[in-house]
Amino acid sequence: MLTQKELDRPGIYVINNKMGLHKYVGQSYNIWRRWKKHRDLLRKNKHNNPYLQNAWNKYGERNFNLEVVEFCKDYELNDKEQYWIERLKPEYNIIKNVFEFWYTTHGKIKKEYFDNKDEEIFIRPTWHAWVYGGQDTPT
């Protein structure tokens, strides 16, 4: 088990239902703080994810744990989270496309995601072509 100090950095985490049922993939600039926030909201029955909240209520806190799947740079968080969502297919995640979520909830994303700043057209990173477009993995 990693210590608080080791978790005070950016990365991708999984909240596992230890009964082998389902999981939730998330990202954070500070994994320790985000795990604490998840637990606080779940304990108060106020989490904004009803799938995770209902499972927490049904199976109890003791049946959930945090697993770090990857530490990364803060600017890599969206790419890495999308990769792990596609790989692990977490059942508790409501949002399956990190980039569309950021675009629709925040209106604008970093300029590298837009083709034309006037029209604000969303451009996916190149790896999306093989993840979402059915193309073979680039070599």
Image (spheres, helix red, strand yellow):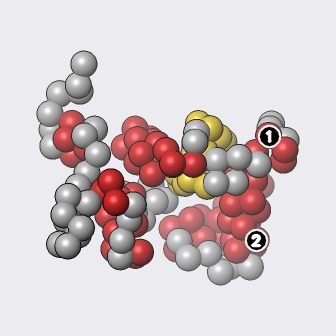
Name the residue rendered at 68%, 79% in the picture. 45
Q: In this orientation, which residue lies closer to the viewer: 55 or 38?
A: 38
Q: Quadrant for residue 83, please give it.
A: top left
**How many C-alpha atoms fall within 10 Å of the one at disc 1: few (<14), some, or many (≥20)?**
few
Secondary structure at numbered mark 1: helix
Q: Which residue is mark 1?
A: 6
Residue 105 vertical placement versus 87 (above, below): below
Residue 77 vertical placement versus 103 (above, below): above
Q: Which residue is mark 2?
A: 40
Left or right, 38 with respect to 36, comes to left
Query: Which residue type carries mark 2?
Result: Asp
Left or right, 37 with respect to 117, comes to right
Q: Quadrant for residue 29, please give it.
A: bottom right
Quadrant in which the N terminus appears: top right
- Can residue 90 be seen here? The reply is no
Nearer mark to the viewer, of 1 and 2:
1
Name the residue rendered at 38%, 65% in the picture. 109
Query: Which residue type carries mark 1?
Result: Glu
Q: In whole angstroms, how far apart are the C-alphas of marks 1 and 2?
A: 20 Å
Name the residue rendered at 25%, 40% in the picture. 126
Residue at the outermost top position? 139
